[in-house]
Amino acid sequence: MGSQAALREALGRNDIEVRFGDGKQYVTMDGKTVELSAEASASEVAQALNVTPLPAVDIAPTPVAVQPAAVPAVKTAPAAGSFAAMIRGIVNEARDGLQQARSDCVAQVREAVGELQAVTAQTKQIGGTMVKSIRDETAAALAELGQISNMPPEDAQ
């Protein structure tokens, strides 16, 4: 059978002693010792000792896998002054700070975009002024060319 503990468990008895020697096992129970081969099974030991083994009984019940019931997501307000309330307050302050930072960022971006739009308008105005000036200069140059072409050659006089 093997170890004393395994034989005690198989037979359901704690008062069994097992010794090995000369290729045999000696099993003692209630003052009675039997000699068996070293490889004797628990049922052979029980038969030699005239013991009816007790059925194996699981003392601790096998735990049943229980699926936890779905808990509805209900937010309950923690008691004032509690640790949870303090933590929630800290988190809310952080969220408020983040929201304020986002609002400030959007305001700054809008201000910068406004400046860019003003520069865009100034660029269009300057571009228009430059175009007018170039066209005026071009017209003056053409007018001068026209006057020159209408002049008689100097040799003809």
Image: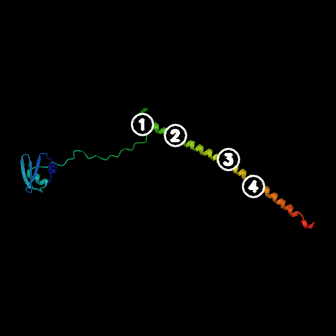
Front position among marks 2 and 1: 2
Q: Which class describes the residues within 10 Å of circle 3: few (<14), some (14-19), or many (20+)? A: few
Tell me where residue 138 appears, x and y as whole percent: 79, 58
Query: Looking at the picture, which amino acid does disc 4 mark?
Result: Val
- Residue 148, disc: none
Front position among marks 1 and 4: 4
The foreground one among 10 and 145 is 145
Residue matched to label 1: 84
Of callouts 2 and 4, the N-terminal one: 2
Vertical comparison of 155 with 13: above or below: below
| SS label for mark 4 | helix
CB-based contact (under 8 Å), mark 1 and mark 4: no
The foreground one among 39 and 151 is 151
Query: Looking at the picture, which amino acid does disc 3 mark?
Result: Ala
Tell me where residue 98 appears, x and y as whole percent: 52, 42
Q: In which quarter of the image is the C terminus?
A: bottom right
Vertical comparison of 63 with 134: above or below: above
Residue matched to label 4: 131
Of callouts 3 and 1, the N-terminal one: 1
- Residue 118, disc: 3
Query: Looking at the image, which residue is at 72% across and 51% down?
Result: 126
Residue matched to label 2: 97
Tell me where residue 106 appears, x and y as whole percent: 58, 44
58 displayed left or right of 128? left
